[in-house]
Amino acid sequence: RPMESGGGPVETGGSLRLSCDFSEYSYAKMCLAWFREAPGKQHEWVAATDFGGPEVSYSDSVKGRFTLSQDSARKQLYLQMNSLTPDDTAVYYCAVEPDSFFSCALIRQYEDWGPGTQVTVSS
């Protein structure tokens, strides 16, 4: 399954870069996404892209602050998070959906999930 890293504590206005290793996967077509879950809140889709492709989509809550990128040769997915606020505090999950027939911008059901990495933004 995918494996996240890079979480930790950060102050308001700061930045963090999350990484996701999905090198175990050999599918030519995959959707790759970041989700987050904060205490007392619903599981939230954050951003998604297609493996090796240019399509990237973001939730309104992070658009303009977060940037999703990938190193397709090394099968690494990244989430650069800037201008963080306490509302961004959550466990962040990397998700992989192999062989999706649908646009990665639209799907919210993913087959494989990482264990998550905690991001804590202090005020």
Image: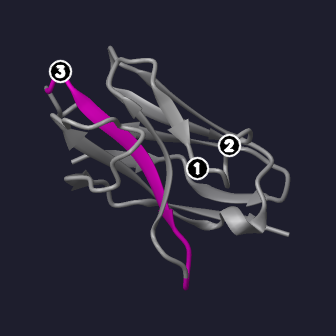
Element assignment for label 3? loop
Residue 28 location (% of width, % of height): 17, 21
Residue identifier under label 1: 59
| Camera-nearest label, 2 or 3 | 2
Question: Is residue 31 left or right of 68 when viewed as pictured?
Answer: left
Identified at 33% across, 60% down, the residue is 115
Q: Tell me which amino acid carries mark 2.
A: Lys
Is residue 22 something that shows in the picture?
A: no
Q: In the rendered structure, which segment of residues is drawn in magenta?
A: 27-40
Q: Are marks 2 and 3 in contact (CB under 8 Å)?
A: no
16 shown above or below 113: above
Circle 3 residue: 28
**Element assignment for label 2:** loop
Quarter of the view holding residue 90: bottom right
Rounded to the nearest whole Å, what is the CA distance between mark 2 and mark 1? 6 Å
* Residue 52: quadrant of the picture: top left
Rendered-image quadrant of the C terminus: bottom right
Residue at 42% x, 39% y is: 105
As for residue 102 lying within the magenta part, the answer is no
Judged by depth in the image, the label closer to the viewer, 3 or 1, is: 1
- Mark 2 vs 1: CB contact within 8 A: yes
Vertical side of 90 occupied by 12: above or below: above
Q: Residue at x 14, y 26 (%)?
A: 26
Looking at the image, the residue that sits furthest to the bottom is 40
**Mark 2 Cα shell of 10 Å, populated few (<14), some (14-19), many (≥20):** few
Q: Residue furthest top?
A: 73
Label 3 to label 1, Cα distance in Å?
A: 25 Å
Tell whether label 1 touches label 3 (CB within 8 Å).
no
Please tell me the numbered disc located at residue 63: 2
Q: Amino acid at mark 1?
A: Ser
Decide which of tag 3 and tag 1 comes sooner along the chain. Answer: 3
Q: Residues within 10 Å of mark 3 (few under 14, many from 20)?
A: few
